[in-house]
Image (cartoon, rainbow, N blue to C red):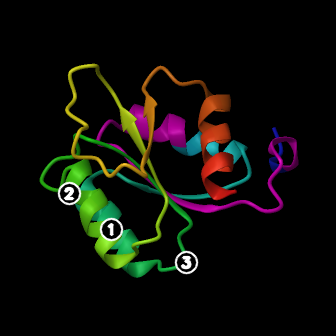
Amino acid sequence: MTSAAHGYREGRRIIVTDDNTSKLATVTQTLRDGGHCVFGAYDGASALELVVQLPFIDLLVTNTRLGVVDGQELMRRAREIRPDLPIIHIIHDRGEDFHSVPPDVFTLRESFTPEELLIAVRDLMG
């Protein structure tokens, strides 16, 4: 699957974080297959460090449960650093409280397909 197949002029630079290594690998590979440059982080603290160290990032993809720095804290702190940073929030179960997620954050339910993820990225990135 090429980036041209999804309407991208060029791949985006994306930070993906998930404390579940299998889910992190799946999302990372899907985005790489879509032509994007992906930086993976196994927890919220590492993802936040990437936001600080890599100011050229185009998108953050996160879930809620990430350990000490959870997804909601990661989103809040990332937006303090980069107020314009687009974010995709992945909800892993129906019981998650996502009411404190900023209203401009795109939400995907865990049962999303690779194509749905790539479409969400395309739509967010314009």
Nearer to me, 46 or 62:
62
Mark 1 residue type: Ala
| Residue to which mark 2 is pinned | 73
Q: Residue at x 40, y 75 (%)?
A: 82
Measured as percent of width and height from the top left, residue 101 is found at: 28, 47
Q: Residue at x 35, y 31 (%)?
A: 91
Q: Is residue 47 left or right of residue 3?
A: left
Q: Residue at x 80, y 43 (%)?
A: 6
Packing grade of label 1 (10 A; few <14, some 14-19, many >=20) is many
Compared with residue 1, is residue 39 higher up or lower down, i.e. above or below? below
Q: Quadrant of the N terminus?
A: top right
Measured as percent of width and height from the top left, residue 81 is found at: 34, 77
Q: Where, by quadrant of the figure, is residue 87 drawn?
A: bottom left
Packing grade of label 3 (10 A; few <14, some 14-19, many >=20) is few
Tell which circle, 1 or 2, labels the residue nearer the N-terminal end: 2
Mark 3 residue type: Phe
In the drawing, what numbered circle is on residue 78?
Answer: 1
Is 7 magenta? The answer is yes
Q: Residue at x 20, y 21 (%)?
A: 95
Packing grade of label 2 (10 A; few <14, some 14-19, many >=20) is some
Looking at the image, is mark 2 or mark 3 nearer the viewer? 2
Tell which circle, 3 or 1, labels the residue nearer the N-terminal end: 3
CA distance for labels 2 and 3? 21 Å
Element type at mark 3: loop
The part of the chain drawn in magenta is 4-27
Instruction: Determine contact: label 1, label 2, CB under 8 Å.
Output: no
| Residue to which mark 3 is pinned | 56
